[in-house]
Amino acid sequence: MSNLVTLTVEHIYKMDNDQLNQVVEAIKLKRNHIAKQMARSVIVGDIVSFVGRGNQRVQGKVLKVNPKTLVVQDTQTQARWKVTASLVTPMTVGA
């Protein structure tokens, strides 16, 4: 996989501004696709984890599922987080 990344980076360095804009747009579309796909795989009540502010690991319960984001309540502090779905890791289902 790193060979693909290395090759892609080499190609990026050779691109002009218009080509870079096309690559940026493709990356945005792919990230949106991944976020929507993850949001569809999570349901209210699932336990998920993610890296929050300050590089701290947060574990919590999904309270709401939006098209690309999740509302997660931290199990320790009871704080609510709005997190991009692609950034979470499912822990348990329907807790």
Image (cartoon, rainbow, N blue to C red):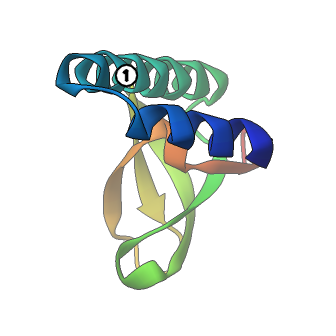
In this image, 68 relative to 37: left or right?
left
User: What residue is rendered at 43% in x and 35% in y?
Assistant: 12
Amino acid marked by disc 1: Val
Question: Is residue 93 visible to us here?
Answer: no
Front-lying residue, 22 or 35? 22
**Residue furthest toward the front?**
14
User: What residue is rendered at 78% in x and 43% in y?
Assistant: 3
The crowding category of the residue bearing disc 1, from other C-alpha atoms within 10 Å (few below 14, some 14 to 19, many at least 20), is: some
Which image quadrant for residue 43?
A: top right
**Residue furthest toward the left?**
17
> Residue 44: x percent and y percent?
55, 34
User: What residue is rendered at 63% in x and 53% in y?
Assistant: 48
> Residue 82: x percent and y percent?
31, 49
When the figure is inspected, residue 55 is found, relative to residue 93, above or below; the finding is below
In this image, 49 relative to 56: left or right?
right
Q: Which residue is mark 1?
A: 23
> Residue 62: x percent and y percent?
51, 45
Front-lying residue, 60 or 90? 90
In this image, 70 relative to 49: left or right?
left
When the figure is inspected, residue 76 is found, relative to residue 89, above or below; the finding is below
